[in-house]
Image (tube, rainbow, N blue to C red):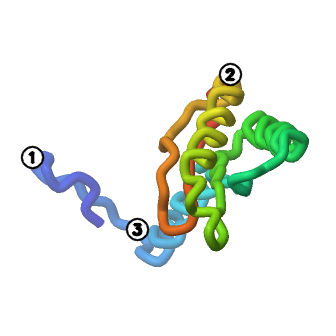
Amino acid sequence: MEISPNAKPPVCKILDYKKFLFEQRRREKEIKSRASKVVVKEIRFGPNTDEHDYEFKKKHAIKFLNEGAKIKAFVFFKGRSIMFKDKGHILLLRLAQELEEYGKIEKMPELEGKRMTMIINPKKN
């Protein structure tokens, strides 16, 4: 097995190739298991979400951010409620402002079909 091909002269080592492959796969698996997995939690609002419901969902968002999960907050427009795009935008910006100490906005509110979506990353501790 060639260890470093760029060296002069090239460095080689004699070993069992199957064992080498096994060790290599095991190392890759260990590195993959150590990598942090990104969890995305979704919070759904309507354009006319009431104050109590908003506060309830905001508390959940704070809990998710403290746990280290990303938040995908979205306003879902049904039927003719798409006329209230500005209400949905204001609602998401208000949420972002109130969660400012817990997380940072990754993506500003953006309309995608019948959904207005915003993504918030947790702040590092």
Give the label, 3 or 2, closer to the camera.
Answer: 2
Residue 15's tag is 3
Whichever of labels 2 and 1 marks the residue nearer the N terminus, that label is 1
Identify the element where label 3 is drawn.
loop
Amino acid bearing label 2 = Glu
Q: Which of marks 2 and 1 is in front?
A: 2
- Most foreground residue, 23 or 50: 50
Residue at x-position 49% and y-position 42%: 108
> 10 Å neighbourhood of mark 2: few (<14), some, or many (≥20)?
few
Looking at the image, residue 2 sits to the left or right of residue 123; the answer is left
- Label 3 is placed on what type of residue? Leu
The front one of 33 and 58 is: 58
Discs 3, 2 touching: Cβ within 8 Å: no
Q: In which quarter of the image is residue 79?
A: bottom right
Q: Is mark 2 on a helix, strand or loop?
A: loop
The numbered dot on residue 101 is 2
Callout 1 amino acid: Lys
| Label 3, label 2: how far apart the Cα atoms are | 55 Å
Residue 123: x percent and y percent?
Answer: 63, 28
Task: Tell me whether the residue at label 3 lies in contact with that at label 1, contact meaning CB atoms closer than 8 angstroms.
Answer: no
